[in-house]
Image (cartoon, rainbow, N blue to C red):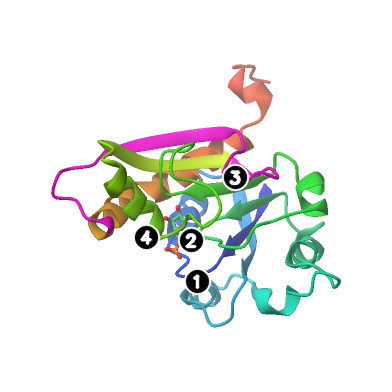
Amino acid sequence: MYRIAVCISGRGSLLPPICEAIENGSLPAVIACVISDRPGTAGLERAEAAGIPALCIDRRKYRDPEGPSLSDAILQAVEGQADFIVLAGFLSILQGTILEKFTGKIINIHPALLPKHGGRGMYGMRVHQAVIESGDRMSGSTVHFVTSGIDTGPIITQRSIEVLPEDTPDSLRHKVGGIEGDLLVEALRLVMAPLKEKRGVVK
Ligand code: GRF
């Protein structure tokens, strides 16, 4: 059974599909904790209501470049407590030691088809706005491993949706949001499946 720490910054809209997959036995995991980088988020309330340990590591307390970093505070909270860190609508950038200690174990979901429409400052509605402005016929969502680059780590899985002429940033957000729960769970299954199972070796 793998332990997951889920990091959020807002609604925590991807928590229910993860919880559902755990409950129906299709994901061999348990949510060890939900961490929000800002106080009072709907995602924290959602976690508490579901009986999941929830904590706020407020990003505003870690602004001093000479002081401890947000990434180190998160590392301290999850080390020994979680096997995977899932960034599910998390707006802070993880840096430093946590990336070394959790190499290949930190997963992010981005609401576009990376490598397009990613990078610093590309989050939320800005992403969908950029897709509309680019005239792209397709958008979607990407789950990838987190590395020191922003949204540039190895891709685990992607799913596309069609962008229609009448689409707006808001309608795109809804369409992409509609596929992200399944996509994230699929990616978690992939990274959690033991190698022998993938090779079809049954003992
Ligand atoms: C998702 O669209 C995900 O791709 C992005 O943030 C959204 C989830 O955050 N990284 P929230 O639950 O809407 O706050």
Helix, strand or loop: magenta stretch: loop
Going by the numbered disc 4, the residue's amino acid type is: Met
Separation of residues labelled 1 and 3 (CA atoms): 22 Å
User: In the rendered structure, are the residues bearing label 1 and label 2 in contact, judged by CB atoms less than 8 Å apart?
Assistant: yes
10 Å crowding of disc 1: few (<14), some (14-19), many (20+): many
Separation of residues labelled 1 and 4 (CA atoms): 18 Å
| Labels in figure, total | 4
Closer to us: 189 or 42: 42
Q: Position of residue 110 (x, y in %)?
A: 48, 48
Residue bearing mark 2: 15
Q: Which residue is rendered at x = 75% and y = 41% of the image?
A: 103
Q: Which residues are magenta?
A: 145-169
The tag on residue 43 is: 1
The tag on residue 28 is: 3
Q: Quadrant of ligand 1?
A: bottom left
Separation of residues labelled 3 and 4 (CA atoms): 33 Å
Q: Is mark 2 within 8 Å of ligand 1?
A: yes
Q: Please, is residue 70 above or below residue 184 in the view?
A: below
Label 1 vs 3, first from the N-terminus: 3
Label 1 vs 4, first from the N-terminus: 1
Closer to us: 8 or 148: 148
Going by the numbered disc 3, the residue's amino acid type is: Pro
Q: Is mark 1 within 8 Å of ligand 1?
A: yes
Task: Name the residue furthest right.
Answer: 66
Q: Is mark 4 within 8 Å of ligand 1?
A: no
Say which of marks 1 and 4 sits in front.
Answer: 4
Label 4 vs 2, first from the N-terminus: 2
Magenta residue check for 160: yes
